[in-house]
């Protein structure tokens, strides 16, 4: 087995927010392994089965060292046992896994092991200064004087007895708070503290195999005079995102439009919506499809940052709407917003549709009941009746109701056209041109 111990605070004086810091490290660590333990203001991760998934020991160690330091870990160490790694971390030993765990532990001071630290005064009177001295004492007499817990922890740290742990459970929802070390007066400077919250979110999403699509960043002002003394920023993503760097870049664009009314002393990040992330499937075929998918994803992320920088409604995205009326089958909304859900059009309801629609139906003259457009049009296919929209109100107090019979029409000069005859009583022109095939 391979364990890494992360200290949530300096040892041996645990600070008041040590429990919150340990909880943040535990949530973050769930992206690497489900075997996470909270123990004595420290977080322990068992990573033996995660090495191959994260590129080997060195790659995983570099990432854990860098990100745990950003989350405020006061120390870290690796070992083959959980208590051994915890003892090495408390003694500020070399953070790399020791080649000889027994020799490395023998040199540690007594306070590096919790049970030995509790009996430090007695053990020092017996001549013990390190764990190696403690191991050389007679076990029977040591058990009578100090109790069985000391021998149990000692054996577990050296790998002579099996360890039993209560695994950390993943919270059902994500909401994390961070008290800032100093007052922040610039909105862009909030990103420094928000990154620590985003690192926790990445761990939570990694354990859920999901990506964030909607976040809410709240902050608390240093003065109670401004209403409830709080502010917030909602962020939506066009694609489900998990990576801290991607979310931080998007959040930075949105914070560029925020002006703080007072200095901020506390941040809170809440995940409001997420979507499952599909796994990557290996293929024996050339990776053109994967490359195209990656290019499309980068384009979406770039457009998302542009939309955040220019503001809402400056970058629009079209979506298909389930509607029988041709001019209402496409809607435009702000890039990244979820399109409005609609009921599906019944199968077989749509007849031939042209590739080009006019912005507005063009009234046509008629002669003898036949429409005219660069000559008399011959009705080839139809009618296809489309009616609806009585439920949709316009700004003038009316509705967008339509009642039409569509035809495919043609003549030698105009080609194939899509025309309709209005069945509404208040419409004077009976025939309209609506599309070109």
Image (cartoon, rainbow, N blue to C red):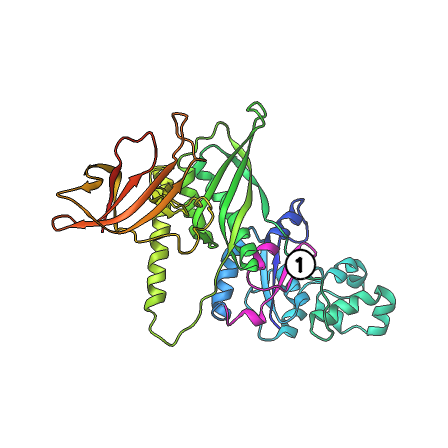
Note whether 425 is above or below 329 in the view shown.
above
In the image shown, does 220 or 74 lie closer to the viewer? 220
Name the residue furthest front: 368
Residue 16 is situated, as x and y percent measured from the top left of the image, at 67, 44
- On screen, residue 258 versus residue 175, left or right, reads left
Number of labels in the image equals 1
Is residue 70 something that shows in the picture? no
Residue 402 x %, y %: 36, 37
Pointer 1 local density, CA inside 10 Å: few below 14, some 14–19, many at least 20 = some
Residue at position x 51%, y 54% in the image: 275
| Residue 143 in sight from this viewpoint | yes
Q: Tell me if residue 350 comes above or below residue 192 in the rendering.
A: below
* Residue 113 pos. (x, y %): 71, 62
Image side of residue 294 versus residue 273, left or right? left
337 drawn magenta: no
The magenta region covers 26-53
**Observer-nearest of 226 and 366:** 366
Q: Is residue 357 left or right of residue 403?
A: left
At x 71% / y 59%, what residue is drawn? 111
Give the labeled residue for mark 1.
168
Q: Which residue occupies 26% across, 51% down?
A: 355
Disc 1 is placed on an element classified as loop
**Residue 154, percent from left and from top:** 74, 69
């Amino acid at each position: 087995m391979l364990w890494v111990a992360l200290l949530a605070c300096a040892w041996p004086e645990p600070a008041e927010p040590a429990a919150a810091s340990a909880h943040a490290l535990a949530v973050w660590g769930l992206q690497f392994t489900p075997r996470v333990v909270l123990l004595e203001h420290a977080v322990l991760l068992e990573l033996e089965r995660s090495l191959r998934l994260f590129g080997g020991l060195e790659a995983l160690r570099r990432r854990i060292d860098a990100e745990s330091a950003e989350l405020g870990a006061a120390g870290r160490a690796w070992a083959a046992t959980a208590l051994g790694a915890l003892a090495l971390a408390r003694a500020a030993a070399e953070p790399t896994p020791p080649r000889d765990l027994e020799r490395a532990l023998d040199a540690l001071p007594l306070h590096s092991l919790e049970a030995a630290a509790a009996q430090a005064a007695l053990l020092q009177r017996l001549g013990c200064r390190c764990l190696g001295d403690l191991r050389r004492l007679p076990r029977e007499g040591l058990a009578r004087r100090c109790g069985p817990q000391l021998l149990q922890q000692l054996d577990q740290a050296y790998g002579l007895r099996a360890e039993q742990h209560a695994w950390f459970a993943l919270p059902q929802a994500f909401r994390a708070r961070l008290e800032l070390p100093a007052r922040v007066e610039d909105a862009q400077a909030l990103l420094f503290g928000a990154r620590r919250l985003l690192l926790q979110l990445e761990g939570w999403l990694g354990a859920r195999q999901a990506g964030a699509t909607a976040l809410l960043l709240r902050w608390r002002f240093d003065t109670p005079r401004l209403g409830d003394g709080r502010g917030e920023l909602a962020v939506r993503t066009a694609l489900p995102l998990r990576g801290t760097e991607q979310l931080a870049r998007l959040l930075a664009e949105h914070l560029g439009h925020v002006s703080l009314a007072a200095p901020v002393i506390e941040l809170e990040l809440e995940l409001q919506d997420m979507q499952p992330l599909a796994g990557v499937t290996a293929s024996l075929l050339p990776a053109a499809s994967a490359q195209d998918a990656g290019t499309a994803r980068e384009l979406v992320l770039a457009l998302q940052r542009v939309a955040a920088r220019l503001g809402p409604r400056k970058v629009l995205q079209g979506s298909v709407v389930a509607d029988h009326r041709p001019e209402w089958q496409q809607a435009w909304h702000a890039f990244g917003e979820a399109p409005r859900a609609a009921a599906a059009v019944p199968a077989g309801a749509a007849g031939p549709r042209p590739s080009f629609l006019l912005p507005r139906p063009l009234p046509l003259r008629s002669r003898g009941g036949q429409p005219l457009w660069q000559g008399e049009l011959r009705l080839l296919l139809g009618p296809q009746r489309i009616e609806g929209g009585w439920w949709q109100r316009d700004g003038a107090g009316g509705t967008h109701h339509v009642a039409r019979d569509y035809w495919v029409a043609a003549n030698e000069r105009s080609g194939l056209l899509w025309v309709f005859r209005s069945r509404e009583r208040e419409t004077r022109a009976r025939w309209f041109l609506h599309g070109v095939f």
